[in-house]
Amino acid sequence: MKYGIYYAYWEKEWKGDFIPYIARVKKLGFDILEVACGDFHNQPDSYFHALRNAAREYDITLTGGYGPRAEHNLASPDPAVVENALAFYSEIFRKMDLAGIRSIGGALYSYWPVDYNMDLDKEGDLERSIRGMRRLADIAGRYGITLNMEVLNRFEGYLVNDAREGLAYVRAVDKPNVRLMLDTFHMNIEEDSLTEPILLAGKDLGHFHVGEPNRKPPREGRMPWNDIGQALRQIGYDGAVVMEPFVTRGGRVGKDIRVWRDLAQGAAESDLDRDAAKSVAFLRRAFER
């Protein structure tokens, strides 16, 4: 397994310059930097060449994430929205390819965060989403990109809320580059067990997010990290394990994640770095016993 962290641990917006974080996460003991792909279309090709070169220099793997905006909703009943989403992703995939990013995860099957003031048609949206995802998978496949369907808790999404629904979706799409993504934060809310969903996912697990129930970096005490690691080893998982901590309020990130208090308790960036380094060292011990 390789261990990573999402750049937004340090940021308040879903965009920015990811390049400085490459050397930073390497120094802290990570193998992977996960970046937000939603604003790739606003960056020139030259930026993605530079991003790829920096990742190669520090031997860091880049992975991508995106919580799709409503205008990129593959489940929309409006065909124009679906076509717009496919065009948007086509450009994102092209730039991911320039940067050497071979996987992207998130609620790619829908949009995020969901507006629950709108009427929901889960069955119809699932049918539309599956059709759209098959088309999207073919586009991603041209670049060798894997699409990881993230299972979300009920407060953030409605189409895929547990591992069983996620697996049913992946198998309905039936494309080799569409896989399941689990996240311990969401699992803690929706699943009866924190290990059984991993065992159920088996070879279909393509990406794994980790975090405490309050979205702090993983640490000893509350979550059964040793058992989670054992389950990952049992299915032969050798992919990315990416922590996704959100501990500071403010900006678009804080608003979307609903961080209404300073979980970092006034921590300086050096303190955030220290906590991340301690967390990844802890995960390696817990998951590789």
Image: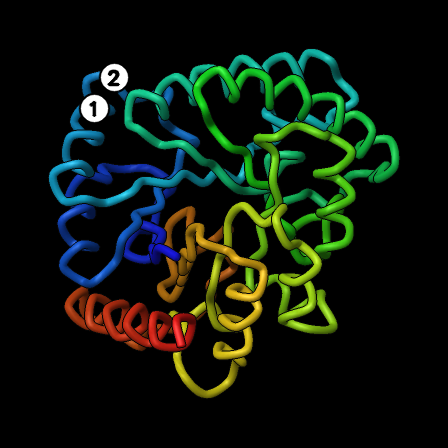
Is 50 above or below relative to 220?
above
| Image quadrant containing the N terminus | bottom left
Q: Considering depth in this image, is 285 or 76 the residue closer to the camera?
A: 285
Q: Residue at x 52, y 58 (%)?
A: 236
Is 93 above or below relative to 260?
above
Q: In the rendered picture of this protein, how many numbered marks are placed on residues?
A: 2
| Image quadrant containing the C terminus | bottom left
Q: Residue at x 25, y 16 (%)?
A: 45
Q: How far across and how far down the image is residue 214, in percent?
A: 50, 72
Disc 1 crowd, CA 10 A, few/some/many (<14, 14-19, 20+): some
User: How is this picture coloured?
Assistant: rainbow
- Regarding mark 2 in the picture, which secondary structure is present there? loop
For this view, does 169 lie left or right of residue 65?
right
Q: Considering depth in this image, is 196 or 67 the residue closer to the camera?
A: 196
Quadrant of residue 127 within the rendered picture: top right
Q: Residue at x 18, y 63 (%)?
A: 28
Q: Which mark is residue 44?
A: 2
Q: How far across and how far down the image is residue 132, in percent?
A: 70, 21
Which residue is disc 1 drawn over?
Answer: 47
Quadrant of residue 227 within the rendered picture: bottom right
For this view, does 242 lie left or right of residue 28?
right
Q: Residue at x 56, y 40 (%)?
A: 148
- Regarding mark 1 in the picture, which secondary structure is present there? helix
Is residue 149 visible in the rendered structure shown here?
yes
Is residue 262 visible in the rendered structure shown here?
no
The kind of residue on which mark 1 rests is Tyr
Q: How far across and how far down the image is residue 238, in percent?
A: 44, 53
